Image: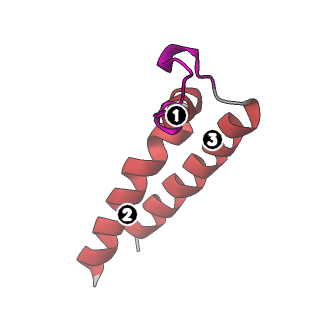
Amino acid sequence: MAEHLFGVGVVFLAIGLPGAVKPYKTAQFTERLDSIGSKTSWDEVEPAEWNVTLTRFGGIFMTALGVAYLFA
């Protein structure tokens, strides 16, 4: 059971850290993925400020969960 929690913690850290450390770049990447199929150029896509804030707090939350699972 402990090795399962360790694996979950590593996955949460891998997903959460980029969002917590570089929220603008992470939000920009997801916006670019969302723009696939759109007529908007890849370079013109910018994330909204609320999206960057949500990415930051989501990343912090996922990182905290990852650390909690690592030490559980």
Residue 40 covered by magenta stretch: yes
Picture quarter with the N terminus: bottom left
Q: Residues within 10 Å of mark 1 (few under 14, many from 20)?
A: some
Q: Are marks 1 and 2 in contact (CB under 8 Å)?
A: no
Most extreme residue toward the bottom is 1
Q: Which residues are magenta?
A: 32-46
Residue hosting label 1? 21
Residue at point 46%, 36% (across, down): 33
Mark 1 → mark 2, Cα distance in angstroms: 17 Å
* Badge 1 or badge 3: first in the primary sequence: 1
Q: Secondary structure at mark 1?
A: helix
Sequence-wise first label, 2 or 3:
2
Instruction: Return the residue at label 3.
Output: 56
Observer-nearest residue: 39 or 59? 39
Q: Position of residue 4 (x, y in %)?
A: 28, 76
Left or right, residue 58 beside residue 65 = right
Q: Quadrant of residue 53?
A: top right
The crowding category of the residue bearing disc 2, from other C-alpha atoms within 10 Å (few below 14, some 14 to 19, many at least 20), is many
The residue that label 2 is drawn on is 9
Q: SS for tag 2?
A: helix
Question: Label 3 is placed on what type of residue?
Answer: Arg
Q: In the rendered view, would you say 43 is above or below 68?
A: above
What whole-number distance in Å separates the C-alpha atoms at marks 1 and 3? 8 Å
Main SS, magenta region, reads loop
Residue 72, which numbered label? Answer: none
